[in-house]
Image (spheres, rainbow, N blue to C red):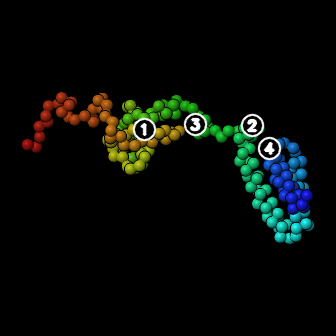
Amino acid sequence: MDPLAWSALLLLLGLTLVVLEVFLPTGGLLGFLSIGSLTAAIILAFYHRGAAVGFLFLAITAAAVPTMLVFAFRWWPKTPMGRRLLLQVPTSEEVLPDSPQRRSLRQLQGKLGVAKTVMLPSGSVLIDGQTIDALSEGPPIEAGQRVRVIEVHGNRVVVRVADDAPLSSDDVLSQPIESLGLDGLDDPLA
């Protein structure tokens, strides 16, 4: 068999052992064997084919070993052993403490309200008779404009203008004066 073929086989064996070292708990034995195999491949290439082929094998080894390690470490968490050893990253909802205030804020998702103050971008909104600090998404919101809660993250309530939604009939300030049944007001200066 050609010495170049032996060099190529030792190079492939060394790269395979590098990947297996990541997946199998051998205490470094496979890592030691992979270093020996890669070194033997480079030495055989230098000895039998000269400096040009030797440096080519050295360059391939220098590029392939980190590439194979990156591949192995990215794939390892998806293996059964990797899933058992590595913890799943908790979401923000799992990390934050659960309180009655947070539960009530989460229930506001999708509800309608009225801006009590100008929101540049933060301000107060009135939702179901409750005043809540909120942030506007996008342009500023004027006081009295209807808003809809679009998302709740922790204690942050994000709202946007809701022109398509009718106001509830129990909001006296938003109704026309004629609908309240009041007699016309006389002009005091007339």
The answer to whether residue 86 shows anywhere in this view is no
Q: Amino acid at mark 4?
A: Phe
Residue 24 falls in image quadrant: top right
Furthest toward the left, the residue is 190
**Residue 48 x, y percent position in the rendering:** 91, 66
Q: Which of marks 1 and 4 precedes in the sequence?
A: 4
Q: Which of marks 4 and 3 precedes in the sequence?
A: 4
- Estimate how packed mark 3 is, as few (under 14), some (14 to 19) or many (20 or more) residues with alpha carbons within 10 Å: few
Q: Amino acid at mark 1?
A: Val
Circle 2 residue: 80
Q: Which of marks 1 and 2 precedes in the sequence?
A: 2
- Estimate how packed mark 2 is, as few (under 14), some (14 to 19) or many (20 or more) residues with alpha carbons within 10 Å: few
Instruction: Quote the CA–CA distance across marks 2 and 1.
Output: 41 Å
Circle 2 — which element?
A: helix
Instruction: Quote the CA–CA distance across marks 4 and 2.
Output: 10 Å
Circle 4 — which element?
A: helix
Give the answer, above or below, for where 61 lies relative to 109: below
Give the answer, above or below, for where 31 lies relative to 151: below
Circle 4 residue: 23
Instruction: Quote the CA–CA distance across marks 3 and 4.
Output: 33 Å
Residue 177 falls left or right of residue 137:
left
Residue 173 falls in image quadrant: top left
Q: Which of marks 2 and 4 precedes in the sequence?
A: 4
**Residue at figure coordinates x 87%, y 55% from the top left:** 10
Q: Amino acid at mark 3?
A: Glu
Quick check: marks 4 and 1 in contact, CB under 8 Å? no
Furthest toward the bottom, the residue is 51
Circle 3 residue: 93
